[in-house]
Amino acid sequence: MSEDREFMKKGQSDGDINISKFCVGIFVIYWALIFTFFFLAGDQLHLRASRGNLAMSTAESGTVELVQGAVVEQSFTVEIQRLQAVSVQWGTYYRPNSGTVTMELWDKNAGNLVLSQSFDATTIPEGGITTLTAESPIEGLVGTPLLLRLYADSQPGSAVSPLMNQSVSTAEDVALSLNGAPVAGTLCLSASGQDYIWTGLHYWQFAAGFGALLALALLYVYRRWAIGKHSYLVYALIAVKKYRFLIRQLVGRDFKTKYKRSVLGMFWSFLNPLLTMLVQYFIFSTIFKSDIPNFAAYLIIGTVMFNFFTEACGMALTAIIGNAGLITKVYMPKYIYPLTRVMSSVVNLAISLIPMLIVCVGTGVRFQKSAVLTLYFLTCLVVFSLGLGLLLSASMVFFRDTQFLWGVFSMMWMYATPIFYPETILPEKFRFILQINPLYHFLKNARMCILGGMSPEPVIYVQCLLMAVGMLAVGAMVFRKSQDRFVLYL
């Protein structure tokens, strides 16, 4: 009979747990999280930067001196659901200029003036950009032919010139004319706005749907418990409750052992990420000249999260063989050993968040309410690390070379994750490495919440949860299938 079955039998008599109260508690927590997320996500829940934003092309030459009577017109279309701004880059001939420059945006189909704004030519520098901004986003312009018209009241010798790119191939609906004469190329212009997020627009419908599924799942668990057919989830809860004292002792032991005979003790949990960040900051900001905005905060967020990952997996790796004496003498579900190793690393992570916050505040990061959502991605990281830790600890029992392979693999993983470099430096052909790297997604979105001051799209939360839970499911399955043979190899 397997160890799980033995524990199930014992759980029926020893496990004193109120399943009905547990199910109700899970359901209440679900809705509390739903309302909390709705508040913290804000506008990012249903709006995102448009994927149809037009990027400004590189300036190659000027167009015409925009004196009184001269007109520059650029036709184009956008795939932006809520248009907010259109920008143009200017050349000044490196001289002081005068007059007023006017930008107008027209709807060619309706013949209506959509936006209009004037700018003082004296304030436009060489290569400067003027932006035609809508007071409120304009909707209904997706695929509509638009016309950007530029004119001024400047005199010859004191007029600015819109810049253009002649190398960009243009579509039929993108045409540039200078004083009524069509020319090849396009203005150096950009257009930006927002698109609606379909899942965000139907947030409450999705929340209600998933809530109904959760209620059915909890009801199923309760009904099985009531008739004596118990699930592994329930018995996991029984195990945690029954052995909670031993779990606390193991977590405390692992945490204290790490700093045994150390003068500074657990203060190293505070000091280690800070010193690592300072060394890397010096190297990459002075020697390699990193141009990442607020590089210190960018670096310490990556350092704290990756250090936790490597520490948790490294400690879980030896959870079974390191407790061989205890396993052969004391009965306890074996998955608790890697679980306590990861939990001790979570304590270390909690302490490491203090220097991370200090560096962020010290470097001028303005925390928005979205910063609280970082806890979600940290939780996903913890779950992912637990799943991988279960897999590594089981592998280590049968194949002791796992510890050496993990040392090499974790180093490769570090360089494949943008901890101290921007993801933009990777060539396009290697970008797929980031997409298949779960740590990249956890780290990127945590930085977005803290440094960007905004929430990722709702689908990102689901993707990160699936990666974390998927790794946990794989690790738990491998661990459960092999745990009965552990004693033969210890």
Image: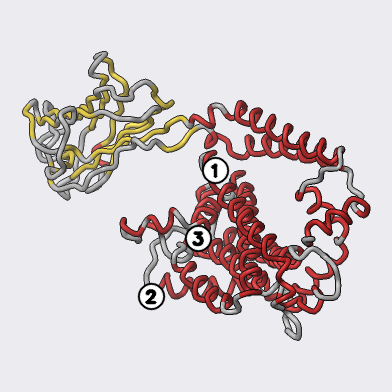
> Earlier along the polypeptide chain: callout 1 or callout 3?
3
Where, by quadrant of the figure, is residue 305 drawn?
bottom right
What amino acid type is highlighted by mark number 1?
A: Ser
Mark number displayed over residue 74: none
Q: Secondary structure at mark 2?
A: helix
State the residue in front, 489 or 130. 489
Disc 3 residue crowd, few under 14, some 14–19, many 20+, Cα 10 Å: many
> Earlier along the polypeptide chain: callout 3 or callout 2?
2
State the residue in front, 451 or 130. 451
CB of mark 1 within 8 Å of CB of mark 3? no
Residue 375 position, x and y percent, is 64, 51
Quadrant of the rendering where the C terminus is positioned: bottom right
Where, by quadrant of the figure, is residue 485 drawn?
bottom right
Mark number displayed over residue 287: 2
> Earlier along the polypeptide chain: callout 2 or callout 1?
2
What amino acid type is highlighted by mark number 2?
A: Ile
Q: CA distance from mark 2 to mark 1?
A: 33 Å
CB of mark 2 within 8 Å of CB of mark 1? no
Q: Residue furthest front?
A: 1
Q: Secondary structure at mark 3?
A: helix
State the residue in front, 365 or 51. 51
Mark number displayed over residue 298: 3
Q: Secondary structure at mark 1?
A: loop
Residue 140 position, x and y percent, is 37, 20
Residue highlighted by disc 1 = 455
Where, by quadrant of the figure, is residue 286 drawn?
bottom left
